[in-house]
Image: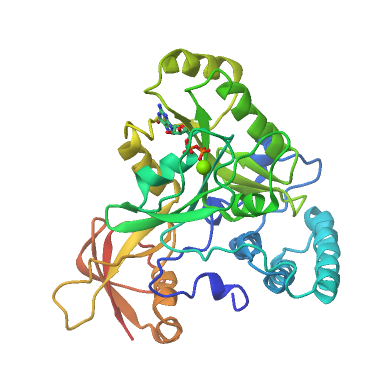
């Protein structure tokens, strides 16, 4: 954990490290379901490995990528089932080292938006589907909305409030069979969730959303109902995606929605909205938060009566008290004796140890 903690160490930013693969290691059942192509035995990757892999996906620089790859190699269980992955990792490490030596410093600086809030959601779609309109409706960001394509040329971040947390939401340039820029791809790769917009306001909407999926399928950054990695091919990632048919207020939108279901065989969960009128946006907000798979934890000092309800820490579902401590300060991790917890799953003030799995909206009082 020493190398990739930069993702988790940003106290008070509610930053979370990764997508839901934390909680669901890729297993033999994924292989059996056929979601992962493989003829070899399952690798049974560990949580530590998957954490490193997620950090790799979200790495902002080549140097970070290299560190994460090296950590992945160290954490990889070494047995027959992981031979191929080991070889690929080693290859990737030496390639990244070379790139690091050659790359002029500016080359990969590229476009970076710092992660903020309980998670990162990236809004994608064909031109004119209403991506910018959705961001305007759900955040205070004001990307330009216009009735012609290619208005948005750069990713634009905003913060979506839901109850007492904020979720980062990013507007992106459009994707067509011919246009898909590398910044958008890396945003998708590092996102906790993708919102794939479909246009119900135009007869071309169905073909366009199919084109977006086909286009990403040609890359190694793909869309899927759940986030996972291909354990036999380290560059290939799948990011959890919700399908958002937009403009349900438009004439003939309901008919187009039926056609969409008939022609596109997507397995994404769907939320139908009108970004313009606001229809369906409340359900979407909640779905976005739930899809992040995080829990909120409030902390309180031993001498305080009330916890600080204004700024919950967010960590992945299944995370422990130690994970919370890590967000606060590394000294808390080292010196944690025990904690008292108030919440829906325990009696008030129950004394627990660091391995206690926190639940949404627990209040914790850490003792060091
Ligand atoms: N009827 C209707 N029009 C919308 C809706 N959302 C966006 N639009 C319109 O669709 C056009 C493109 O929107 P924009 O957000 O710029 O699309 P982008 O290119 O995907 O960012 C604009 O004229 C918007 O007013 C909606 O929910 N209903
Ligand atoms: Mg736009």
Q: Residue 7: x and y, percent? A: 54, 70
Q: How many marks?
A: 0
Q: Residue at x 50, y 64 (%)?
A: 115
**In-front residue for pair 196/146:** 146
Residue at left 40%, top 53%?
A: 141
The residue lying toward the viewer, choosing from 118 and 173, is 173
Quick check: can you spot residue 256?
yes
Residue 165 picture quarter: bottom left
Question: Quarter-wise, where is residue 263 in the image?
Answer: top right
Rendering coords of residue 43 (x, y %): 72, 53
- As drawn, 284 above or below 332: above
- Seen from the viewer's position, the closer of residues 223 and 200 is 200
Residue 3, given in percent of the width and then of the height, sits at 63, 77
Relative to 368, residue 15 above or below: above
- Residue 168: quarter of image: bottom left
Q: In which quadrant of the rendered image does the N terminus lie?
A: bottom right
* Colouring mode (rainbow / by chain / secondary structure / one colour): rainbow
Q: Quadrant of the C terminus?
A: bottom left
Choose between 150 and 228: the one closer to the eye: 150
Q: Residue at x 69, y 32 (%)?
A: 214
Can residue 26 be seen here? The reply is no
Point out residue 332 in the picture as x, y percentages from the top left corner.
Answer: 40, 83
Left or right of 55? Residue 101 is right
């Amino acid at each position: 954990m020493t190398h990739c903690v930069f993702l988790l160490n940003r106290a008070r930013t509610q930053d979370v490290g990764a997508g839901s693969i934390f909680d669901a290691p890729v297993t033999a059942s994924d292989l059996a379901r056929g979601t992962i192509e493989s003829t070899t035995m399952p690798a049974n990757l560990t949580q530590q490995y998957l954490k490193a892999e997620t950090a790799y996906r979200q790495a902002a620089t080549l140097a970070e990528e290299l560190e994460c790859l090296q950590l992945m190699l160290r954490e990889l269980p070494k047995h027959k089932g992981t031979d191929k992955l080991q070889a690929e990792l080693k290859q990737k490490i030496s390639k990244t080292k070379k790139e690091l030596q050659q790359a002029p410093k500016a080359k990969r600086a590229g476009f970076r938006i710092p992660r903020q809030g309980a998670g990162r959601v990236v809004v994608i779609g064909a031109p004119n589907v209403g991506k910018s309109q959705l961001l305007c409706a759900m955040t205070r960001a004001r990307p330009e909305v216009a009735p012609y394509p290619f208005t948005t040329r750069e990713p634009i971040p905003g913060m979506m409030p839901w109850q007492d947390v904020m979720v980062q939401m990013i507007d992106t340039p459009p994707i067509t069979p011919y246009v898909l820029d590398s910044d958008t791809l890396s945003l998708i790769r590092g996102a906790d969730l993708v919102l794939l917009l479909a246009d119900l306001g135009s007869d071309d909407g169905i073909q366009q959303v199919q084109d977006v999926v086909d286009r990403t399928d040609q890359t190694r950054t793909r869309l899927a109902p759940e986030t996972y990695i291909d354990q036999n091919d380290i560059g290939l990632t799948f990011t959890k995606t919700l399908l958002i048919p937009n403009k349900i207020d438009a004439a003939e939108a309901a008919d187009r929605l039926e056609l969409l279901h008939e022609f596109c065989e997507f397995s994404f969960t769907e939320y139908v909205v009108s970004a313009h009128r606001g229809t369906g946006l409340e359900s979407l907000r909640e779905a976005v938060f739930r899809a992040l798979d995080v829990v909120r934890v409030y902390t309180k000092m031993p001498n305080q009566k009330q916890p600080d309800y204004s700024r919950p820490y967010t960590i992945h579902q299944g995370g422990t008290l130690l994970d919370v401590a890590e967000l606060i300060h590394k000294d808390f991790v080292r010196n944690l004796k025990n904690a008292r917890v108030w919440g829906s799953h325990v009696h008030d003030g129950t004394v627990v140890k660091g391995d206690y799995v926190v639940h949404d909206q627990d209040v914790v009082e850490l003792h060091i």
